Amino acid sequence: MSERKGVLLRLDPAVHDALARWASDELRSTNAQIEFLLRRALADAGRLPGNAREMRRPGRPPGRTQLPPRRALLSGQ
């Protein structure tokens, strides 16, 4: 599995704030919202590569369905 690419993105503060609000409304991080929008734009333009992996769905990762007992959380185990 390949590592994800990191990109430095400079945004106007007002654009960043609008993206952050939109991401929050959709229960995504700002980073995930930017990736979602870029993927949608690429797909709409017919430029999304066929080998691009799907985005992770919102929520807890699979296999992590139950929280540890509260006692374990408090004791640090």
Image (cartoon, helix red, strand yellow):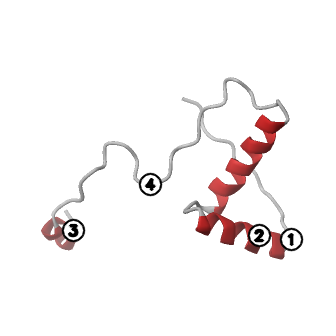
Q: Residues at badges 2 and 1 in contact (C-beta under 8 Å)?
A: yes
C-alpha gap between disc 2 and disc 1: 6 Å
Residue at image coords 63%, 41%: 4
Q: Position of residue 13 (x, y in %)?
A: 82, 75
Mark 2 highlights which residue? 16
Mark 4 highlights which residue? 59
Mark 3 highlights which residue? 73
Picture quadrant where residue 62 is located: top left
Q: Position of residue 73 (x, y in %)?
A: 21, 68
Q: Is residue 31 left or right of residue 15?
A: left
The amino acid at mark 1 is: Asp
**Of pointers 4 and 3, the one earlier in the residue sequence:** 4
Residue at image coords 77%, 69%: 16
Q: Position of residue 75 (x, y in %)?
A: 17, 71
Q: State the SS at label 1.
A: loop
Q: Which mark is residue 12?
A: 1
The amino acid at mark 4 is: Gly
Q: Residues at badges 4 and 1 in contact (C-beta under 8 Å)?
A: no
Q: Residues at badges 2 and 4 in contact (C-beta under 8 Å)?
A: no
Image quadrant holding the C terminus, namely bottom left
Foreground mark, 4 or 3, reads 4
Question: Mark 3 Cα within 10 Å, few/some/many (few <14, many 20+)?
Answer: few
Q: State the SS at label 4.
A: loop
